[in-house]
Structures are given as C-alpha cells and as structure tokens.
Image (tube, rainbow, N blue to C red):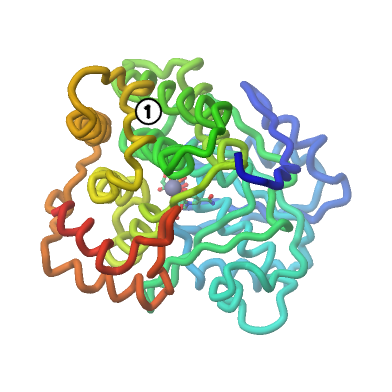
Amino acid sequence: MLNFDFYNPTQIVFGKDRIADLAKLVPAEARVLILVGGASAEKTGTLAEVRQALGTRQHETFSGIEPNPGFDTSMQAVQKVREGGFDFLLAVGGGSVIDAAKFIAAAVPFEGDAWDILLQGGRNIKAALPFGAVLTLPATGSEMNNGSVITRRDIGAKLPFRSRLLFPQFSVLDPTKTYTLPPQQLANGVVDAFVHTVEQYLTYPVNAPLQDRFAESLLQTLVDIGPRLLAAPEPDYDDRASLMWAATLALNGLIGAGVPQDWATHMMGHELTALHNIDHARTLAIVLPAMLNERRVQKRAKLLQYGERVWGIRSGNDEERITAAIDQTRDFFERMGIPTRLGAYGLGTEAIDAVIRQLEAHGMTQLGEHRDVTPAVSRRVLEAAL
Ligand code: NZQ
Ligand code: ZN
C-alpha cells in the first residue's frame, strides 16, 4: 500500500426528510446565498423546502448555474455575494451547482483575476467562504470532496481545481430528491460513479486488498442497481439510496487512499465536453472502453482481477478474459442507454485534432498512473472510440 493522507471533514446528513435539518446545520446568524441551477429545484419543491428550513435567516437565491458550470455565471454570483454581504453559500442541485459553489466560495476573497484559480489548479486559494449542499443528483461526489470543474465557453476550456478549504461543511443527501430525475441523468449518475471508481482501482496492484474490495463492492452495486433504476416503473427508495451513497463514496477520497490513480479518461472527457457540450458521464463512456483496451498491457493484472471479481469472467486465456472485461464494461454503459462511440454523438475523425490540441494547451500531456498517456496515446484512444 502507498503512503497517504486522508482528510474529509464533510458532515453527511442522509435520508428522507433531512432537508429540515438545515435549521440546525446552517449557522443561525448566517446571511445565506442559495445557489441553484435551472428550473429543477424550484419545480420539484426542493427550493421551497430549503427556504422553509432556513426560517428567519436572511437569504436570497442565485439561479441559472448551468450544467458544466460557467466561469462567467459563477463570477456574477461572486459579485452578488460581495455586494450583498453574504457569508454562507448553500448549493441546491447536482455536481454543477456544488462545483460552482466551491469556485464562488474561493473567488469571493480571492485577490486578482479569479481565472488564475483554475490555471493554478487551486494551489493559490488562501481563503474560502463556508458552504453546504443539498444534493439532488447523485453522480459526481462533489458533495463530499474538495474538487470542482469550471468551464470557460469562450475559449473551450474546462479545468479542474481543488483545495483543502473547499470541502462542503455538510451535505444533505435525501434519496427521494432523485425521484424527479429524468432517466438520462440517472444513467449519467451511475456511469460517472462507476468511472470514478475505475479510475482509482483499475491501475496496477500495490497490495491494497481493502481498497480493492471497497472499489469492487461499489462497482458491483452499480452494476446491480443501474439497469433496475432505469427499468423500475416507480422509484425504489433503497436503490436510490444505494446509488446516492455509492456515488458519494466513489469520490470522497476513501477508495483512492493508498493506491495509484489514473484520471486520464476524465481529463480527455472534460475536453470533449468543453468542445462539444456532451454530458460529462457520456464523455467517460466514450473514452473508457477504448482507454482500457489501449492500456491493456500496463493494466493487465487489474483488468484480470476486475473481470473476475466484478463480471465473473473465469474462462479463456488472459487476453480473452481482458477483452471480455472491456466488452462487459462497454455493454453495461450501452445498457444504461449511454452510447460509447463518438459517431453516436455526431463526431468523426475530424473532431480528434481539436481534442488533442486542447489537451496540449492544458498541459494534459502525461496522463494516467504511469504518466505515459501522451497526446499520441490519447489520439489512438479517440481513434479507437470512433
Ligand atoms: O439545472 P437544473 O434545472 O437544476 O437541472 C439539472 C441539470 O439540467 C438536472 N437536475 C439536477 N437534479 C435534478 C435535476 N432534474 C430533475 N430532478 C432533479 N432532482 O440535471 C441536469 C444535470 O445536472 P448537473 O449538476 O450538471 O449534473 P452532474 O451532477 O452530473 O454534474 C456534472 C458536473 O460535475 C463535474 C462535471 O465535469 C460536470 O461539470 N464533475 C465534478 C466532480 C467533482 N467536483 O468532484 C467530479 C466529476 O468527475 C465531474 O467532473
Ligand atoms: Zn466524473
């Protein structure tokens, strides 16, 4: 096992009817700016519930945070916080709203051009406003981690940053809040959580059996509940609860402690979203199967373990078993209604050059657990994903 630090101060408040707990979780004297996305939080009644729980606390709402939250929109919120003297942010939504809250929390006290936060990956963050979250879309794990991804559409850049100062103080996870999700967002959530787990598990062995089994249990749970979530005529509380907790655990630092991490699929996926506005999870479904096949030699031992323990693949020689494991992965994404080929999103060979150029522009030239995913490797992955 590798050395590691594990630090996660986020309080999780899980279960039905837990939004009422905001009355205790948000400081009594706080001046709260509630952050929401488009119309969903209002339409579903969640926003009204949140406002009621805040009681007599002074609060206003900033709405309009878009999926793949934009730098410009977030800066409008920064201005509102500065002008209104708000001292607590409450994100109500999915990963995009929570990610925007993290950026806003860091940008309000930041001196200088806030885009530098992205260019420095968050290393220049010295202070941040406190914030909490009410999660409505289980997928990203943003509700219990210190990372965020912000997009600048004018230059086609989608960049990640993180800071110890950017863990939510608390996150309310009420599985019933997922009941209004359209099937494609439910599928996105399953696939995003699955790929987060894979990026921290499917690397090379370091004798960390506990982390391996944590990861395998998350993968098996997602494989088990994923198709059932889509097929259920009515939402099943326990399956929704399992998805919510699995997505949180997949990226709260636990399964990645003491093991190598990959993240090449995510970094390539971010470029596809920035250039073509494809949902985050869908970009991962395009890249991952081709990525695993391209790196089947480096990932050999873990691919065999993954095939056997997650998919029950025990017959055939090693190469056949690895191929079967990758095929099962692709098939799972497709069964979740998520196409895994660039062509299905209207993209062909002509799209590849621009992705490679952006990876180079963003310094994403030595990706993966061995730093060997160069632009040439990324190109082969995209060609295989056509
Ligand atoms: O905008 P509204 O109207 O709220 O609608 C949203 C949005 O259109 C809708 N939605 C959310 N909750 C709903 C709902 N609709 C009905 N009922 C509900 N309960 O769903 C749509 C997508 O929401 P979004 O927040 O964009 O999705 P997601 O949670 O998948 O977040 C994606 C963003 O997170 C980043 C991604 O790159 C992307 O920008 N990620 C953040 C990570 C992190 N912070 O650790 C890691 C991830 O790998 C990822 O990169
Ligand atoms: Zn992701």
Cβ at disc 1 under 8 Å from ligand 2 = no
Image location (x, y in percent) of residue 105: 69, 62
Give left or right: position of 12 versus 319. Answer: right
Under circle 1, the secondary element is helix
Q: Which residue is mark 1?
A: 305
Q: At 39% from the left edge and 33% from the top edge, which residue is drawn? A: 190
Give left or right: position of 73 versus 85. Answer: left
- The quadrant in which residue 366 appears is bottom left
Q: At 43% from the left edge and 21% from the top edge, which residue is drawn? A: 221
Q: Quadrant of the C terminus?
A: bottom left
Seen from the viewer's position, the closer of residues 288 and 337 is 288
Residue 203 appears anywhere in the view? yes
Tell me which amino acid carries mark 1. Answer: Gln
Image location (x, y in percent) of residue 374: 33, 66
Q: Residues within 10 Å of mark 1 (few under 14, many from 20)?
A: many
Give left or right: position of 82 versus 72. Answer: right
Q: Quadrant of the N terminus?
A: top right
Looking at the image, which residue sits at the far right? 29
Q: At 50% from the left edge and 22% from the top edge, which residue is drawn? A: 242
Seen from the viewer's position, the closer of residues 163 and 16 is 163
